[in-house]
Amino acid sequence: QNLIFKVNQEGINLGVKVPHFEADFYDRTPDDPLEFKNFTSFDLNLKNGIVELSDKEITQTAKTVIQKKTPLLKDIKIDFLPGNNVNADIKVKKFINLRLQLGGTLNANPVNNTLFYTPEKITLNKIPIKKIMDFFGLELGEIVKLGSPSGSYFTSGKSIYFTPTEFVDNPKIDGHITAIKTGNGTLAAMI
């Protein structure tokens, strides 16, 4: 109960607050004592509990991870709001400066252990384009191709999907997110 895990690897820098959880730790180095500071020394099987993250740390991590794969990204800001609402403000530069603003809901899919973000509002340089997309029957996954289904994030249909257990290499995490809840600046995932 009441733990904070610091994840600091390959651009991911998160303070994960854990009010409580039940988990099995599997020691990868049974000849040495289990060392919690070294995430390569154990695997984790989450059984149940709550994990909390802040939108500021998610913003920094998203910026770092996405910039590695998409150098066009200049800035990103993610805001968690009550009621599973999430706003994203994305700035890219490809010949000209573009600003993409998304407003939508974030939900959990326990069946395949993903979170999916479905934008209900999309503006490009302050021009609403969601209604135009709907008029032509276009979905986000057809216009923007991000990642792949075997990775940590990808677009498909009307949503952007995230597989949280794929974001970090170590420790290897097994567990299923059953629900999420957002508040002002925070995201809580129930396992």
Image: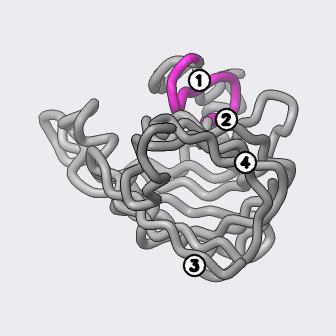
Residue at figure coordinates x 49%, y 52% from the top left: 34
Label 2, secondary structure: give it: strand
Label 3 close to label 1 by CB (< 8 Å): no
Q: Which residue is mark 1?
A: 141
* Residue 160 inside the magenta-drawn segment: yes
Residue 24, above or below 16: above
Q: Nearer the viewer, residue 126 or 108?
A: 108
Question: Upstream in the sequence, badge 3 or badge 4?
Answer: 4
Residue at figure coordinates x 82%, y 38% from the top left: 109
Residue 121, above or below 79: above
Q: Which mark is residue 159?
A: 2
Question: Upstream in the sequence, badge 3 or badge 2?
Answer: 2
Q: CA distance from mark 4 to mark 2?
A: 32 Å
Q: Which residues are magenta?
A: 150-162
Question: Upstream in the sequence, badge 3 or badge 1?
Answer: 1
Label 2 close to label 1 by CB (< 8 Å): yes
Confirm whether residue 49 shows in the render: yes
Q: CA distance from mark 3 to mark 4?
A: 30 Å
Marks 3, 1: nearer the viewer: 3
Label 4 close to label 1 by CB (< 8 Å): no
Label 4, secondary structure: give it: strand
